[in-house]
Amino acid sequence: MKIYLIFLFFLSFSLTFSQSQNGEVTYIFFAYGSKKEVKLRFNNNESIFTIKNDQLNKKRVEVTTDEEKSKVDLYFNFDVNIPNNLGMLTDIKNNCIIDHKFLPIDFTAIKFDTLFVKDTAGIISWELLNETKKINSFNCQKARGNFRGRIYTVWFTNDIPVSLGPWKLNGLPGLILEATDSLNQFQFFAEKVELQMKVNIINTEGFLNQNYITPVEERKKYISFVELMYNEISTKIDTSLPRGVVSTINNANAKLVNENNLIEINFNDIKLK
């Protein structure tokens, strides 16, 4: 009888665990050589993806002139004053992704434009491959998919059967623990995985009933932001240079944003709707 009761206890324990998948993954995110820590809190159907702001890394602008190399000590760090955002919500059941973001409205980065960008989840067509490996003691399978102009190779684990992953990567039969685009410009590596028996409540309240924009509209706002920053930096540099020295940054024909270098290159799936 005692053995039977113990068996029932462990059976109930395993069934509860298999039915409820909750936890948090800490990833290391590489983008063009820069390194950030990102986290994914998840339950069976929802996740919140957050990026840790860089409070220390100040950017320096260097100006090159035709005659000589002039250095202007112009520092800026938009992460210092940025408000705490809610992160990116992925809701598999309702087939949506909502990303809460901020864009500075000027060079001082004291005031920000608040954005809620609404997208569709589960639109990546994945090819499952026959390669396997272990990541953090989890058995993982390889898959490949094309999303917004980039080809991603990912490793997911059926040991955690949720269709979620870092950023907007989702739609596989297990949690994505590693992802790399074909050019190695964007990479996610799971550093720590913490599973929880307690149900992980994802607070969606702040994401609801907002004025949503599309990813295409967000791209236009981002380009406008870059142009604004470019003009402000150009003005500050021009006023800092010696008389008669003209900086090469003031090239009116220069393309400010190369969209082929952004994480989302095209939005053909949205335009075709």
Image (cartoon, rainbow, N blue to C red):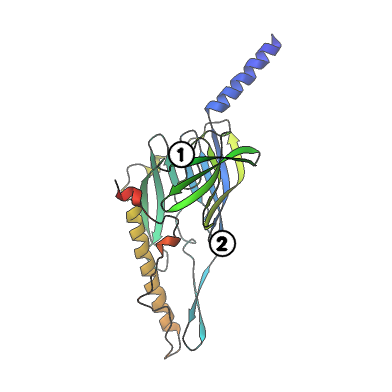
In front: label 1 or label 2? 1
Real-space Cα distance between discs 1 and 2? Answer: 27 Å
Q: Position of residue 211 (x, y in %)?
A: 30, 48
Q: Position of residue 77 (x, y in %)?
A: 49, 66
Residue to which mark 2 is pinned: 33
| Rendered image quadrant of residue 253 | bottom left
Rendered view: 261 above or below 124: below
Q: Residues within 10 Å of mark 1 (few under 14, many from 20)?
A: some
Q: Pick the residue in front: 169 or 147.
A: 147
Q: Earlier in the sequence, mark 1 or mark 2?
A: 2
Identify the secondary structure beneath mark 1.
loop
Q: Position of residue 93 (x, y in %)?
A: 40, 34
Kind of residue at disc 1: Gly
Residue to which mark 1 is pinned: 171
In the picture, the quarter occupied by the N terminus is: top right
Residue found at x 34% / y 64%? 224
